[in-house]
Amino acid sequence: MDVKSRIDILTEELNRHSRNYYENDAPEISDFEYDRMMAELIRLEEEMPLLRRPDSPTQKVGGAASRQFSPVQHKVPVISLDNSYDAEELRNFDQRTRKGLPESALVEYVLEPKIDGLSVVLRYERGVFVQGATRGDGIVGEDITENLKTIKSIPSEIAYTGELHVRGEVYISRKAFVELNHRQEIYGGQIFANPRNAAAGSLRQTDPNVTASRPLDIFVFNIQYASDAGTDQAPALKTHRETLEFLKEQGFHTAEYAFCPDIEAVMAQIPVWDEKRRTLDYEIDGLVIKVNDLRQREVLGLKAKSPRWAIAYKFKAEEQETRMKDIQVQVGRTGVITPRAVLEPVRVAGSVVSFATLHNEDFIKEKDLRIGDRVIVHKAGEVIPEIVRSIPEERTGEENVFRMPEFCPSCGTALVRLPGEAALRCPNHKACPAQNLRGLIHFVSRGAMDIEGLGEMMMEKLSEWGLVSEIPDIYRLTKEELEVLEGLGEKSADNLIKAIERSKKADLGRLLFGLGIPLIGSKAAKQLARHFGSMDALMDASREELLAMDEVGDKMADSILSWFASERNRETIRQLKEASLNMVSTERVSGENEKEAVAGKTFVLTGTLERYTRDEAQALIEQFGGRSSSSVSKKTDYVLAGRDAGSKLKKAEQLGVQVLTEAEFEEMIR
Ligand code: AMP
Ligand code: ZN
């Protein structure tokens, strides 16, 4: 299928599912499946922006407003939030925020629980609640005023007499949810999967009497719009904290929040809330961190779908039970055969999971996982879905023991297991189509040559069409060839050629990583590039010369030597040279530049530096032969502490690790 038809199908399907979800409360596919289709569409549109349709779901915030309720045009768009999952991302958010503000600005934050409910906007005029709407697509929502009037915690009158639009989250408490389901069971009503579904279903009833019987509640967290027309008591609010206090005074329910004078205070709150959420009577799926100063918010402004002044923080992995429907195998770049579990979709720590890696055959045996088993799923490292264990007590006898295939599913070659390795491999490295394609995708990927517009899909197509079957082919592509391909217009073809051209200048480290030499990850590739300075020097390096590098051990040295010994690989390099790819390291640092004080030392950064961003400081440390790590331990040599340093500084002091000021650090590298 050509790319244009694929984009058409995805656009239409996604729009249909979005209507099912938002308008009919009747999703046909899992959130995961939806996200997967959306991700594919985003990727295709990025590759070929001209094919993006005006009705593309990537251009909207949520679902469209339903026809069942009358549309309400929001006075101020009801936008979404960016997500973060760890401390690093929160610090990056803080850094971005500071960068967006004048240098001297202090940034305070307010931290609120992220209520897992439904966003609504309430409008008051002359102190009276006149209209309430769902979020809809963020621009137009649905009028659910009558239903909202049945919620006791929404005041029908407030003291403030200007026009006031507030945003809040409607939810059902845990306790009320259990009671509701119990009641539904007795009266034969619908049983809800979770409080959020129950709240959604209740809020969008066509009969407000039904809504009235449902235990809905609300937390209000923002003023969307306030006019002082006809009143002398316009809220002179300077901060978000004042906003929340003002809302409270007006009789709105607001959730408990924490004021944080800086990002370190935010960090300190996270474990506190992670603990606290278990005892809250409402479900939260994370926290929201917002810039406190309203003027700073204005300066920071908005992006297309989210504000620059706020970010959501999603909590760590939770465990969930589901069923493992099947086990599939995939062939990786180096021929490793990886089994993965196909799961009945289940929501784990904020997203729906349908697959989980099973690593290798031993993993499956050790855990005694059988196809059809009930299993416990969690997210390793907060992102990667993984099976914790099976629940043999729940077996029905229908379960099947899984056997790894004997032959490669891509090329049919008999699989082998190298001694001492858990993984099965397809040994046909030269001609296995799956491995070859994975290798090409790896070469153009972000971490390697970073060729924009050459995503996984595009690479698959080029290989299918027979235009690219090995790396140097990429540099032989012509605009004319690309242009005539279905769906790829002149402009996209032109952009692609330009991106390929640009990649020729990539640093040697990227090229080395992209070539996919076994055991050479991106870090090792970078270090090799820096150390040897050029492809030729590395190609000619002896075992001793390789081993002289701290980072290179026996196995790595063997792998490099045997890779360059292959005539086929040498030919690849020759052809890439011919295509004028850069073969030297522009980041080369000569021996005398490696500062003794820094070389080989481990640094941990904390707080905000005046002169460098975190990335810049890390790059400097690496440039001088040091390492940077994210947590303080006894192995840490130095903690480089900037302004507002927090827990890492304390830890350093406890462990007796030497603490450097920014000035001392500069002294070291000067
Ligand atoms: P998402 O649905 O992942 O885009 O997350 C953004 C949503 O979180 C918003 O649309 C709100 O409905 C919801 N939310 C819940 N609690 C808060 C809060 N305290 N501040 C802002 N948004 C919140
Ligand atoms: Zn194979």
Image (cartoon, rainbow, N blue to C red):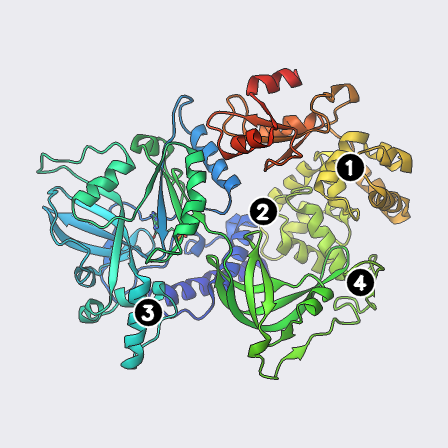
Which is nearer the N-term, disc 1 or disc 3? 3
Q: Are marks 4 and 3 in contact (CB under 8 Å)?
A: no
In the image, 301 versus 101, the foreground residue is: 101
The amino acid type of the residue labelled 4 equals: Cys
Figure quadrant of the N terminus: bottom right
The amino acid type of the residue labelled 2 equals: Ser
Residue 582 seen: no
Q: Residue at x 55, y 29 (%)?
A: 653
Q: Secondary structure at mark 2?
A: helix
Give the residue at mark 3.
178
**Badge 4 residue CB within 8 Å of ligand 2:** yes
Give the residue at mark 4.
426
Q: Residues within 10 Å of mark 4 (few under 14, many from 20)?
A: many
Residue 408 seen: yes
Q: Residue at x 56, y 20 (%)?
A: 662
The amino acid type of the residue labelled 3 equals: Val
Give the residue at mark 1.
551
Image location (x, y in percent) of residue 251: 16, 48
- Distance from Cα at disc 1 to Cα at disc 4: 29 Å
